Amino acid sequence: MPPDLILCDGQGLAHPRRFGLACHLGVLIDIPAIGVAKSRLIGEYGPLPPGRGSWVPLIDKDETIGAVLRTRDEVSPVYVSIGHRISLATAIDYVLRCTPRYRLPETARLAHRLASG
């Protein structure tokens, strides 16, 4: 059974070519996809409040390409961008739901632990 949603450790629309890993994967398998990255490739953003759930738009050339999202209080943010068949607001909501205890979504954290283990 295919998954309902994919969270990629990488960018989606917030990519220099506007088509990062989350876009590629989502289009190839036609499943909603979200890019959740630890670092910013492109774009600018304003001040981000320190609390969990705070976010500001990530802007490039007057276009919103993603969100800078704080998943833990006073911890470095993650960069969320749509990949395929999902809105930015929904992507932010899913990323927050998948980060109950740590900065990164549980899916990425567990995958990294399995790969490193």
Image (spheres, rainbow, N blue to C red):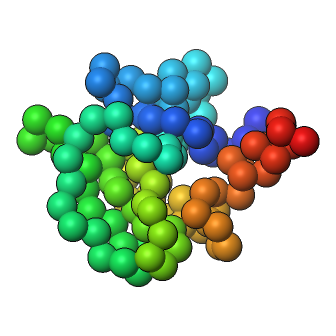
Q: Farthest residue in the left direction?
A: 62
Q: How many marks?
A: 0
18 sits left or right of 86 in the view: left
57 sits left or right of 117 in the view: left
Q: Is residue 27 visible?
A: no
Where's residue 54, x and y in %?
Answer: 36, 73
Q: Quadrant of the C terminus?
A: top right
For the point 45% across and 35% down, the residue is 11
Where's residue 36, x and y in %?
Answer: 51, 46
The residue nearer to you, when weighing 73 against 5, is 73
The residue nearer to you, when weighing 67 against 86, is 67
For the point 82% across and 47% down, the residue is 113
The residue nearer to you, when weighing 113 against 5, is 113
Where's residue 101, x and y in %?
Answer: 67, 73
Classify 31 as above or below 109. Answer: above
For the point 48% across and 79% down, the residue is 73
Classify 49 as above or below 97. Answer: below
For the point 77% across and 36% down, the residue is 2
Q: Quadrant of the N terminus?
A: top right
43 sits left or right of 36 in the view: left
Classify 75 as above or below 24. Answer: below
Where's residue 95, x and y in %?
Answer: 54, 59
